[in-house]
Amino acid sequence: MQLSDFNYELPPELIAQHPLANRTDSRLLELKVDESGRAQLADRQFKDILNLIQAGDLIIFNDTKVIPARLHGQKETGGNVELLIERISGEKQAWVQIRASKVPKIGSIVHIHNPRGESFPVEMIGDDGRFYEVRFPENVFVLLERFGELPLPPYIDHQPNSDDAHHYQTVVAKNPGAVAAPTAGLHFDEIILQNLKDLGVNQANATLHVGAGTFTPVREEDLSKHQMHYEWYSIPQETLDAIVTTKQNGGRVIAIGTTSLRALESYAASAKSSDETNLFITPGYEFKIVDCLLTNFHLPKSTLLMLVSAFAGMDNIRTAYQHAIQQKYRFFSYGDAMFLCRLENAKL
């Protein structure tokens, strides 16, 4: 597999910059794979999800909560520094991405500040070649609440505001730790969740703390050389039990988002219900748990585009994305959604 196999041209005006006023007002592209393995597309509204998910199906959300993960500060020399949490590794430690004219040396101190004039020191303690490990003087979550800023994705060109604080968080979010939202879940509100429940659709949660590495570009043309970033996941026993029951009763397991899918498939690969995962899913991967997927439209050359191509077939995803561009669907985090189900004979 080559990186160039997953490229496409997207008009910039199709990148959604703001959330819709109502979560469920987004559009939904249904991709069905027929018996020959080819894509059949249908343009829908998101509320049509009530006609696509059936009684006895199990929908699994990622219940991670986005934290205010962007920090601003200064080096001891006075230069400006921006830290973006990649993942939290301990009560007082985290791996971060750093933006600065020159990255601070290991052992040096960065002084983080906020608009109220408060500050605290962060110590540089290590690096792994891509990210830097830092030590906080007290609990990371406590300091982020006082000093952090909502980390909107790099393709959104405005500063986070009150709309973002509300809409860049799913209604099921409860476990703090993500630095990016599990965006497929953003389309649901409490009403549509109740509607699904009334239809006899079962709901369960998993947790995968989305890391900043999800936005890191793939730089290797040969995908076998790409080093996937790590993210922490946990799946409750009741969710695992619900999966078994659903399969036994002939229902489908439907992942709400690629992060839910990665958590479930990481469990299937490792038999560990809680762990760090760097599972890299590309075409040819054999899915073991997930039958259907609700997902947004993903960036060119991204690992998430590779994942959905593995799920529904590369040609089918190319066809779907070309159609979405022609029909002016909204792309990326605040954009519209796709619903796709897996068939083993999908053309790669």
Image: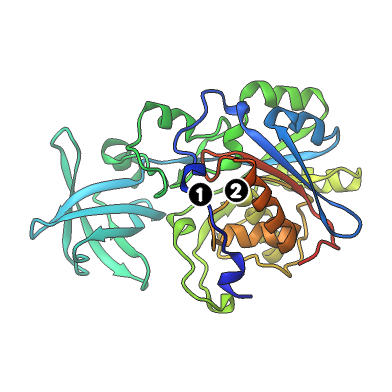
Using the rendered view, name the quadrant where residue 1 is placed: bottom right
Left/right placement of residue 328 relative to residue 128 reads right
**Residue underneath mark 1:** 11
Task: Residue at 56%, 65% (x, y): give it.
Answer: 278
Task: Residue at 56%, 23% (x, y): give it.
Answer: 22
For the residues marked 1 and 2, what is the alpha-carbon distance in whole angstroms?
A: 13 Å
Element type at marker 1? loop
Q: Residue 69: horizontal and vertical position, in percent? A: 36, 46
Using the rendered view, name the quadrant where residue 163 is placed: top left
Element type at marker 2? loop
Q: Residues within 10 Å of mark 1 (few under 14, many from 20)?
A: few
Q: Earlier in the sequence, mark 1 or mark 2?
A: 1
Q: Nearer the viewer, mark 1 or mark 2?
A: 1
**Relative to 281, is 66 above or below?**
above
Q: Residue 263: horizontal and vertical position, in percent? A: 63, 54
Amino acid type for the residue under numbered disc 1: Pro
**Relative to 144, is 311 above or below?**
below
**Residue underneath mark 2:** 297
